[in-house]
Amino acid sequence: MTFQRDLFGGLFFYDLNTITMTALTRTPQNTNLLQPTKYLLTFSRIPNVQYFCQAVNLPGVSVGQAPLNFPSVDVYAPGNKLTYNNLMVTFTVDEALQSWTEMYNWFRSFASPNGESERNRLSSLQNQGKNPPKPWYSDATLTILTNLNNPSIRVNFTNIFPVSLTDLQFDTKMSADDIITSDVAFVYDQFEIISA
């Protein structure tokens, strides 16, 4: 994309790299569609949540814009700061509440009202005795599978931690066949998409 000023000081654009398409270059090599059930979510910290995971999203991303003001028209330039949406995970809750308690203990490992000793104990327990440099964080990987259940893409989330955990709703009007689920929202530094 090239910028050039007209006689009146206005800015206009023209594209040097025009791409022509033929019938041969329009067909993608892989025409298989993405399946919503073909994924694996792994955390180093919460094995029960990853086992009972029912749904997960690949978060969206946005970038700001900077207006360039000119007398006749406003032109926008892309910003330089990415904003990532939350990673949302829905998981079923087992009858011993292990999956929900794992998430609750992660919250308490960095925000326990009982003080620093409990925070350190829970953090060490969830990190399996390891002493990572950032004990309240974890890394996560969303592996997207092909139609044949082979890994196709890995999405690596760095420095992830939870920011909300939904209620567990008990209700006598519900059937015994109804499954109790919970949602958890995570924030993270960034994610990287890698071919598997």
Image: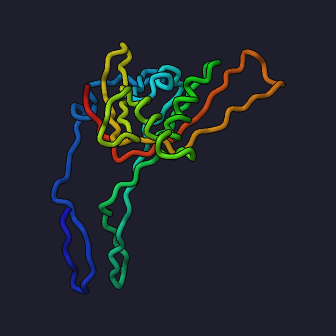
Q: Quadrant of residue 65?
A: bottom left
Left or right for 85, reference 135:
right
Left or right for 188, reference 152:
right
**Observer-nearest residue: 174 or 14?**
174
Q: Residue sitting at 16 percent across and 54 percent down?
A: 17
- Quarter of the figure with the N terminus: bottom left
Left or right for 112, reference 142:
right
Q: Residue sitting at 34 percent across and 45 percent down?
A: 190
Q: Residue sitting at 52 percent across and 34 percent down?
A: 105
Where is residue 7? Give x, y as percent.
21, 85
**Observer-nearest residue: 154 or 105?**
105
Where is residue 95? Give x, y as percent.
65, 18
Q: Quadrant of residue 97?
A: top right
Residue that lies at the very extreme toward the top in this rendered image = 148
Residue that lies at the very extreme toward the right in this rendered image = 173
Q: Quadrant of residue 42?
A: top left
Where is residue 52? Give x, y as percent.
53, 21
Residue that lies at the very extreme toward the left in this rendered image = 16
**Observer-nearest residue: 94 or 69?**
94
Q: Residue sitting at 58 percent across and 39 percent down?
A: 165
- Quarter of the figure with the C terminus: top left
**176 versus 126 height, above or below:** above
**75 versus 40 height, above or below:** below
Where is residue 96? Give x, y as percent.
62, 19
